[in-house]
Amino acid sequence: MKVDISNVSSFQRKLDFVVPAADVRKQLDDAFRKLAGQVSMAGFRKGKAPRRVLEGRFGPKVRMDVADALIQRSYSDAIRLNELQPVGQPSLAESKEIKGGTDFEFSITVDVRPEVSLKTTTGIEVVFPKFEIKDEEIDAAVQARLEGNARLVEVTDRGVQIGDMVLCELTVTDGDEEVAREIGTMIRTEADPYYPGIEPFLDGMTADEEKSGTVTFAEDARTEEVAGRELNVAAKVISIQANEVPELTSDIADELGFEGGIDGMRNALSAQLSAGREEMARNQARANLLEKLIEANPFEVPDGMVNSSLNMLVEELKMQQAWRTGQDPKKIHFPESQLADLRQRAAFASKAGLILEFVSKTENIEVTDADLDAKYAELAETRGQTVEAVKGWFVKDGATDELRDRILEEKTLEWLLERAVLVDPPAVDATAAEAPAKKAAPAKKAAPAKKAAAKKKAAAKAKPAKDEAPAASSGADLSLVKLAIGKLKAALATGDHDANIDALIEAETNGKARKGALDALQARK
């Protein structure tokens, strides 16, 4: 077999093959000999049918099968011997007819990993986001810790409020049919999983009070008999329990594991927030650096490579959403708008991966056993497991090489960032930004006093305060912060609210500042 390889583009190769006539003849002879032993033809004993008879009836099929086999074998040998790295399915560009007495010629095109060569990798100006931890954020973190240490206490001086736990007798009927009966069940008045929809019905009821009415239960009720149905409900409140959040004192701070009383707790939480924000800023700087490198060294990547990265990204997001919501990953689908965004991220990831691979090879950056052990320890601490357990999981799953690749990318990124010139984000000139709008605004007649006052009031309301960060989107839907934490996580997992994530964090911080909600929002960010 002879093969000539030529470059069609930076990542596409054309392979021109010539299989000698002698090899073609041998493959055809073997194929017809094997066929003769398998078929029975009228007038001939099995295995004794002449070649010309077999060719007359089965010739086109046999020649097609032999051609396919030669193409497959030749292509595999060429890829192995020339150390090519295909990133997509090969395509048969052209093929001549296969005959016993002539060479068999055909051509295949295939996309391979692009060869990247960077002009510069050091001294690049990279924006490193600035951040500050405000007192309000520390207050919210303190409140979240206090709420995490809340205790259930019985309430006797008021009625049921949303957020309470209510022990009640419950009878659910559909006409004369009894659908469900609970002698004593605990109802969460915020997203109860078993009887969702009953929460407003119980709102305001006091201990020992009885009430009857109709309730429309949610489709996802774990009590299947009531799911999605409008039914008659009779309830009696036995007791009301509410979370009592302790007041912040030095003793409570010590109890929560913070040394130095209230000041020590605030300082420790400030340090934790700073560490998290520093890591976020550093990750953003890494992304900015890769973007700069891609801009400075433009190159294309094959669709097969992008599709592979996209499929991995989609599957990862499906597994994350399934873990959060309990859905079957096979039934999770993403809207076209999100898939388009994911494709852009996949293309960026493909180019970034090639750049990091080039730098690591050029600069001889390697992963040592010590690096691997450090990563095992980091993952163990994050997951609350032993190092041996984490290491065992990677070995058992055959994922150690994948982990080494991840560590190599991290080391290479850090090498690049250490040799970059870190700069502050550009300042925004609010006066300059407003100038075009003022210039473009046409003159208007004076509005009546009431209308002018209303417009002035609306403008004042719409304009953010000097130190207030504007919403991530002018149409930010902040109603998510009113959802129970489980439903909030499910909504975030769709990706539909990513553009408003900062506004949602701010709204949650300024509202209930629930630790679970803030954790989910920060994790999504």
Image (cartoon, grey):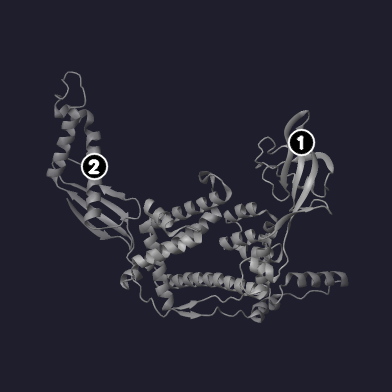
> Percent position (x, y) of residue 26?
13, 40
The residue that appears at 65% across and 63% down in the rendered structure is 504
* Residue at the right extreme of this rendering: 449
Residue carrying label 2: 69
In the figure, is residue 318 to the left or right of 12? right
Q: Mark 2 is on which residue type?
A: Ala
In the figure, is residue 147 to the left or right of 460? left
Determine whether the residue tagged by mark 1 lies in a helix, strand or loop: strand
Determine whether the residue tagged by mark 2 lies in a helix, strand or loop: helix
Mark nearer the viewer, 2 or 1: 1
The residue that appears at 60% across and 56% down in the rendered structure is 492
Camera-nearest residue between 189 and 122: 189
Q: Which mark is residue 36?
A: none
Mark pair 2, 1: CA separation? 72 Å
In the figure, is residue 351 to the left or right of 273? left
The residue that appears at 14% across and 29% down in the rendered structure is 51
Q: Mark 1 is on which residue type?
A: Thr
Q: Which mark is residue 171?
A: 1
Residue 334 in view in this figure? no
Residue 524, image quadrant: bottom right
Q: Alpha-carbon neighbours of circle 1 within 10 Å: few (<14), some, or many (≥20)?
A: some
> Percent position (x, y) of residue 118?
35, 73
Residue 176 in view in this figure? yes
Image position of 332 with respect to 147: above or below: above
> Percent position (x, y) of residue 509?
68, 66
Q: How many marks?
A: 2
